[in-house]
Amino acid sequence: MSVAFDTSLSGMRSTQTMLDVTANNLANATTFAFKASRVEFSDQTYENIQAAAGARSTTGGVNPMQVGLGVQVSAITPQLQQGGFEPTGRDLDAAIDGPAYFRLQKPDGSEIYTRLGTFGIDSAAAGQTPKLIDTTTGYRVLNTNGATISPVESIPAVATTALVLSGNLPPAVPEPLHGSTLSGLFNMTLRSDGTRAGNATRLADTNLGSGNGAATTLNVYGQTPDGTPYSGTVALAADATIEDLVEGLNDVLTNGTDRFATASFEVGRLLIKGYQPGNSMTLFLGETAPPPVGSGDAVDNSWQHADTGVYQWNLTRLLPPDSEVPLNLSLYTADGTQHFLGARYISTGIDATGGRVWDLVVNNPVSTEGSITGSRVVQGYTFNANGTPASQPTGSLSTNWSAGGASTVSLQATALTAFAGDSHADADDTTGSVAGSLVSSRWDSQGYMVGTYSNGVTRRMSETDHQLGLATFTNPAGLLADGGSQWKVSANSGAPTYVSAGADGFNAVVGGVLEGSNVDLAGEYTRLILAQRTFESNTKTFQVADEMAQAANGLVS
C-alpha cells in the first residue's frame, strides 16, 4: 500500500504542475507576444515483481510482472506558434511575420530577444542622441549591425536634378475664331511666395517687376480683329496696380467712342476680347518704341515685345487660345531655395502625320534673381496618332541664381500626351526639396525606419543604420524565458543567427501592430477540467489506500 501512496502522490504533484502552467497561460491570455506552455508527462520507473522467463521444452514462457511507481513531469515546452496581429495606432509598434526575434541590448551590453515590438524614441540622456528603445523595459533596440538606432531628425536641402514634364497638348489645330480673344500665357503672381496677384496688386510686386519700381510709359500696339493697325501709350506710376494697367489698356483699345476690344484681368491672367469680325487681333507691350507696322514682330505674333526696363512684358505674352500651353516650373538649389520659372509649349508646326509639333520655351527669371545660362528652348516634341509620345527630345535647364548658385535640371517628357480635349501642363519635381525636420516615423516590411519630414519627403532614414536587427535560433524552444516577453540564450537553444527582415520573403516586419498572445482559451479550459478530474482521481486512490491501511492496522488492535 505504500506504493499506492507514493504513486497517487506523484499524480497529485504532476497535476498541480499542470494546473500551475495552465493558470499562467490563462493569466497571460491578453499579454502581447506571450507564448503558451504545454506540460508533458511520462510514467516513472517500475518495480519488478517477477522476471520474464523464456519458453522451455515442456512449458511456455512467462511474462514479467511490474508495478508502476507513478507519473512525472517530463517537459514544459513553450508553444511558439505565431499570435495574431492587433493594430495599436502607434506607428513604431512592430511585429514579425515569421519565427525571428527582435534584438535588444540590456544595460550591461548583453543581448536579449523578444517578439514584443513596443518601440519608441527616448528623450536622450545629456550629451546623447535619442535612441530607439523597448518602451516596456527601456532596453535599446539593435539594428542589423548590432548597433543602437538613432532616428534621423532632420534632412538637408537637396538640389533638383530632374523635372518630369506631364500634361496634355491637344493634337488638333484650333478652328479660327469669329472675333479674336487673346489670353495671357502666364499667371501674374507675387514673386515672394508664388501666390496669385489681384486687381489691387502693385505691378512692381508681381513676377513682371524687375525690382526697379519706377514710373514708366508703356507702348501698346498691334492689329484690331480686322487687321487695322493701332497703337497707344499707358502711363504707369511707380506704384501702379494691375487695375491701372487694365484701365490704361482699355483706353488704347478704343477708336474714338468705338471700342474694338476690351481688357480685363481674370483668373490671374490678362484677357483681351475683340468685338469686331476677324481673326487678326494682336497686342504687344513694351517700354521701347514699337516696331514698324508690318514687321514680323507685329504680324506673326511670335513674341511679346519687351526690354530690360522696369517690367518684363514678355511674361504677359498674349496669344489666341490653344496656340500655346502655359507651364510653371519650380526647382530647388542646394541651399534649399525654391525658384520659379515661367515656361510654355508653343505649337510650331505640323509633322508628316498631321500632328502638331511643340517646342518648350522657358522664360528668363527676373534679372536680380538669376539667369538661364544654357538654352531656353527644347525643340521637337511630337506624338503618335494614339496620343503617346513619338519623339521625346532630351534637354536640360541650366541656370545661375543669386541665392543658390548654379543648377542643372534634366527635363523628362515621359508623361506628356496628345489626346483630344483640354490642354494643360505640369512639371513634377521628383528630386529636390528644402531642408526638413522629422514629423513621424514608421516601419516598412523590410524593417527599415521610414521618416516623414516637414518638407513632404518620406524616405528610409538609411540603408545601413536603420534596419531592425532580427535573430533566429536552431532550437527556439530551448530559449529561456526571462519575463517581460523576453528570452535569453540557453545551452540548448543554439547561438543566434542574425537575419534581415523580409529576406527571401521571410520575417517581414509589420508596423503599427503588436503580436497577440497565442493562448488557446478553449484548450486551456479543457486542461483545467482534466487537471481537476485527474487530481480528484489521485486523491481518491490516496483515500482508498489510507482506508485499507487503517483496516490492516485494525487486525492487531
Image (cartoon, helix red, strand yellow):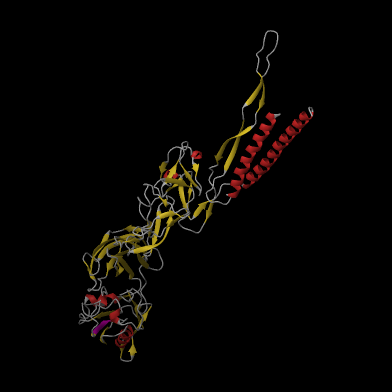
- Comparing 459 with 227, the one in front is 459
Q: In the image, is 90 to the left or to the right of 376?
A: right
The answer to whether residue 349 of the structure is visible from this angle is no
Task: Give yes or no for residue 78 being in the magenta stretch.
Answer: no
- Specify the farthest residue to the top: 57
Q: In the image, is 61 to the left or to the right of 465?
A: right
The quadrant the N terminus occupies is top right
Task: Pinpoint residue 451: horizontal percent, then vertical percent.
Answer: 39, 58
- Magenta: main secondary structure equals strand
Magenta stretch in the rendered image? 217-222
Q: Residue at x 68, y 39 (%)?
A: 535
Task: Pinpoint residue 206: horizontal percent, then vertical percent.
Answer: 30, 78
Q: Quadrant of residue 382?
A: bottom left
User: Looking at the image, is 513 positioned above or below residue 178?
Assistant: above
Q: In the image, is 456 to the left or to the right of 401?
A: right
The quadrant the C terminus occupies is top right
Task: Pinpoint residue 496: horizontal percent, then vertical percent.
Answer: 42, 40
